[in-house]
């Protein structure tokens, strides 16, 4: 088995003259769940897009080793409104696995619904099902729960944990939420000045320390 699911070395990305990612290194082991924190504008989405292969302008002498089986989930579900739920899930893959994937995310019986008939949380479930049918070795998620209410977010955390335990993809989850990072991930990394400035096992990650790394002071 490969020793890593993702290996990024010396990755640089600049916009005009400004380096957003500056010689960045990051390795993720197979099946490892990594949460990526960082201040707003620190380059989290830029890194995710580069790893997803959605950015063709990354530069540097870098290495970017990413498996072929990658699935990406965004803050909005990006479902196509003119396709029914099942067709959204099976878009671009061999049909047949969508029904089971929808059942796994708790949407049995909703295969023929239109995206607009679903709640925000249900739409994110469909987006997760769409990831699942791709049997990804790597799941990239850019604040997938950011737009959900607190209760729905808690339910989605439980679902994501369950799906990850079962399918064991490597995960890179971008989040603003320190508690979400500690709760879900095996490892928490913080993007600072274009590089991974802090890299800790989640069980060692201290909330106050992480908040201060993000520039958020906490009153004692
Ligand atoms: N296409 C682009 N053209 C110019 N600048 C860009 C482009 N994409 C991103 N940037 C800049 O790169 C920086 C990092 O953006 P990015 O979206 O990666 O940050 P982020 O950490 O994901 O932020 P947030 O937490 O607010 O979503 C920002 O200053 C942004 O303005």
Image (cartoon, rainbow, N blue to C red):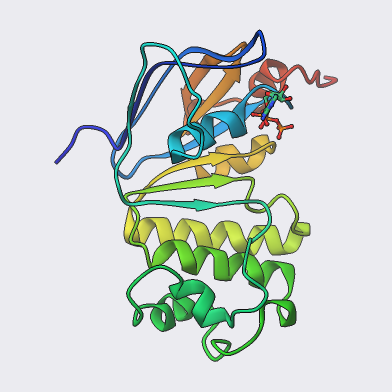
Residue drawn at the location 64% of the way across and 46% of the way down = 143
Residue drawn at the location 76% of the way across and 16% of the way down = 215
Task: Write down which quadrant ligand 1 falls in.
Answer: top right
**Residue 127 at x, y percent in the picture:** 56, 64
Q: In this view, does 29 lie above or below 84?
A: above
Q: Is residue 7 above or below residue 111?
A: above
Side (left or right) of 173 relative to 118? left
Figure quadrant of residue 194: top right
**Residue 124 at x, y percent in the picture:** 62, 64
Q: In this view, does 123 lie above or below 205?
A: below
Q: In this view, does 142 lie above or below 198?
A: below
Figure quadrant of residue 18: top right
Q: In the rendered image, which quarter contains the C terminus?
A: top right
Q: Which residue is outermost to the right?
A: 219
**Residue 118 at x, y percent in the picture:** 71, 78
Q: Is residue 105 visible?
A: no
Residue drawn at the location 65% of the way across and 70% of the way down = 123
Q: Which of 152 and 220 is in front in this view?
A: 152
Side (left or right) of 168 relative to 113? left
Q: In the rendered image, which quarter contains the N terminus?
A: top left
Q: Which residue is outermost to the left?
A: 1
Side (left or right) of 61 relative to 14? left
Q: Nearer the viewer, residue 47 or 201?
A: 47
Q: Nearer the viewer, residue 15 or 206?
A: 15
């Amino acid at each position: 088995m490969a020793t890593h699911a993702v290996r990024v070395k010396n990755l640089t990305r600049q916009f005009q003259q400004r380096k957003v990612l500056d010689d960045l290194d990051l390795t993720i082991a197979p099946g490892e769940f990594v949460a990526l924190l960082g201040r707003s504008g620190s380059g989290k989405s830029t890194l995710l897009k580069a790893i997803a292969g959605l950015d063709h302008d990354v530069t540097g002498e870098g290495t970017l080793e990413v498996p072929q089986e990658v699935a990406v989930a965004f803050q909005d579900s990006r479902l196509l409104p003119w396709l029914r739920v099942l067709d959204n899930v099976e878009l671009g893959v061999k049909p047949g696995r969508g029904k089971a994937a929808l059942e796994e995310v708790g949407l049995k019986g909703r295969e023929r619904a239109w995206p607009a008939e679903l709640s925000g949380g249900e739409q994110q479930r469909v987006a997760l099902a769409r990831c699942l049918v791709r049997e990804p070795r790597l799941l990239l998620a850019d604040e997938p729960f950011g737009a959900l209410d607190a209760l729905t977010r808690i339910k989605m955390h439980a679902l994501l944990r369950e799906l990850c335990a079962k399918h064991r993809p490597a995960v890179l989850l971008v989040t603003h939420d320190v508690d979400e990072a500690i709760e879900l991930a095996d490892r928490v990394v913080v993007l600072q000045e274009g590089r991974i400035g802090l890299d800790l096992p989640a069980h060692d990650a201290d909330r106050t320390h992480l908040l201060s790394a993000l520039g958020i002071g906490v009153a004692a």
